Amino acid sequence: MNVFALASEKLTATVAAMCADKVLPAALDLSRIAVEAPRDPSHGDVASNLAMVLAKPAGMKPRDLAAAVAERVVDGHEIVSADVAGPGFLNLRLGDHVWWRVLDAVLTEGRHFGDSAMGAGRKVLVEYVSANPTGPLHAAHARGAVVGDALAALLIKAGYEVLKEYYINDAGAQVDTLARSTFLRYREALGETIDAIPEGYYPGAYLRDVGAALAARDGARWRDMPEAEWLAPVRAFAIDHLMAEIRADLAHLGVEMDHFASERQLVESGGVDEAFAALETGGLLYTGVLEPPKGKTPEDWEPRPQTLFRATDFGDDVDRPLKKSDGSWTYFANDIANHLDKYRRGYGDMINIWGADHAGYVKRMKAAVSAVTDGGGVLDIKICQLVHMMDDGKPVRMSKRAGNFVTLRDVIDSVGRDVLRFIMLTRRNDQSMEFDFAKVREQSRDNPVFYVQYAHARAASVLRHAGDMPADPAARVAWLTAADKRHLTAPDELALIKVLAGWPRLIESAAESHEPHRIAFYLGDLAAAFHGLWNRGRDDARLRFIVDDAPELTRARLALVRAAQSVIATGLRLIGVEPVEEM
RNA sequence: GGCCCCUUAGCUCAACUGGAUAGAGCACUCGCCUUCUAAGCGAGAUGUUGCAGGUUCGAGUCCUGCAGGGGCCGCCA
């Protein structure tokens, strides 16, 4: 149950009744009415701007209109008071039993509390990670992986049908370089001495494993053949090998993709030609010469006619080339095909999670999606800003060139999957963040993961001490919902229930804005409210959850504890973190 | 040179997509504490939201310009 929806229905019903009574004109536009929690709890439980939005069409002053609605909306039961404040806000206060009902809803709905029908089963494709298959995932991939995965889970909870997809860049020059680099390691595995890795090859030691595996499978078969013979099979072998590692690393992080899309397969099956044809049919291609980028002219720049896409018609800054000088497709052309393919698979809503290095690419991709789907497809792109890896305040040096970058696997092994996942959501995606190995392992109030986990474990501890409570889950829910909630009237008890009541709304707003970090922040707030209640018991034993000589009071409080624990657990699981029973 | 993101308390960051007196944590000061779980609790103080304009009942949020930080900028992906 969603108290904001409840209040919203009450308010619109009241306005409708006033229209019917001709107090207000008919056919008012109610779409801009907001019903939300006021920032300051002293203003009430629910606030609405309806009087300010409707004032002009209704021909009334906002405060007068608000007062008229206030008078009619109060029923002394669910809405116990309505006040006009400021320029015309309508502040509602809900009856305590509304909150008690929320508590029962949390208990009976369990992990389904907060599920929303908002998505109405609409299909959404979330593409994330999509790292090149030329090496293991490194630390910088963690953020996109976690943000994408949590967003996907969030959208599922909000009622969307989600496909989690990884786009494998297995078609460009980089995978040819991978093949050649692997071939060196293959010869090495066959006994040759490789003095130095030539310039332009991948030097990473991880390719030794790949070379050795190839030698183990095929022996010396490729060694003396010309490159044209071995390039494709070695490339395929290396990609398969590295993708298997990438999948294993993702699994280690708790990320399970639904689908892996191959760029090469897309190209070979004619997907790019189709996208090209679609653009050509729309008259969106022409041959032209681009200006060199100002202030940074490449040394070998020479004006050259190219096949260009009219990206500027769709909000981009310049038109973009689709073919390289050797006649092959640009990465952009392939990616257009990738997105057209998504669209044709039924995914009109697409979300891509990208790293900061791709930020300059956003406009053209959105332009392309708009063009190639004739406006039918919508692409949202979330840019994950850089993560600065630190250890106790000192930057962790990473050099991809030297091949000594920190792998994703290293980070997971070092701090644990749960910590990594949670921390990656403690910043908005478009904000850069520090990740300090020492700090995230710290067990203190400063560490948000610890703080939230501790709240869950504390709740579990209380429930373990509750002697009367049935152990069987169904019986326990029945026992807790049957508790007399009239014992829960203290302001901070109600405050905790109000935080719980905000969960369904948080799911919807986070899903709508594609911002999974809000879950982590919400859990921090919820944990704070719970710890606050706990701490009341330190000074006054009567304020503890379990009061020995007051079984009915205890039972009601246990219902609150269990409800808080349940929402914390649901929230943690939603972002892929396992709640702990003990710490 | 161009484009994108960012700039909020001393520090690290929020702010429910335009709402009311901009909030947390850390650090700081004072007091308390050893528990249903020890890794703490309570109280206090903290602001020209980078700067200058604009839009409107109302702007941290939207539009323009400027400054600073980061990222990117045809034939890499």
Image (cartoon, rainbow, N blue to C red):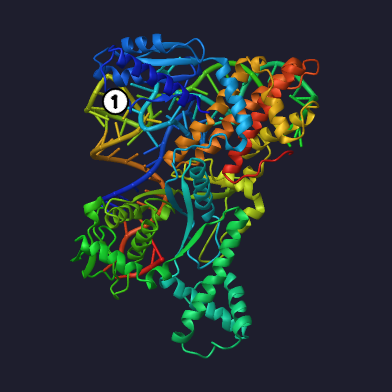
Q: Going by the image, does A288 lie left or right of A299? A: left
Image spot of residue A23 (x, y percent): 29, 11
**In-image side of A415 versus B38 (left or right):** left
**Quadrant holding the C terminus of chain A:** top right
Residue A448 appears in the figure: no
Query: Residue at 53% across / 28% down in the picture?
Result: A1
- Please report the residue visible at 29 percent of the width from the left and 58 percent of the height from the top: A372
Q: Is residue A263 above or below residue B14?
A: below
Residue A146 is at least partly visible in this image = yes
* Residue in the foreground of this view, choosing between B8 and A420: A420
Front position in the image: A25 or A524: A25
Residue A571 location, quadrant: top right
Q: Where is residue A491? Give x, y as percent.
A: 60, 15
**For residue A321, which quarter of the picture?**
bottom left
Residue A68 picture location, percent across and down: 35, 10
| Above or below for A57 versus B3 | above
Q: State which chain disc 1 sits on.
A: A
Within 10 angstroms of label 1, few (less than 14), some, or many (20 or more) residues?
Answer: few
Q: Disc 1 residue type? A: Asp
Where residue A99 appears, x then y in whole percent?
Answer: 57, 20
In this view, B58 is above or below A504: above
**Residue in the picture at 32% in, 65% down:** A333
Q: Which of A540 and A163 lies nearest the eye of the viewer?
A: A163
Q: Which residue is mark 1?
A: A29
Q: Residue at x 60, y 20 (%)?
A: A100
Name the secondary structure under disc 1.
loop
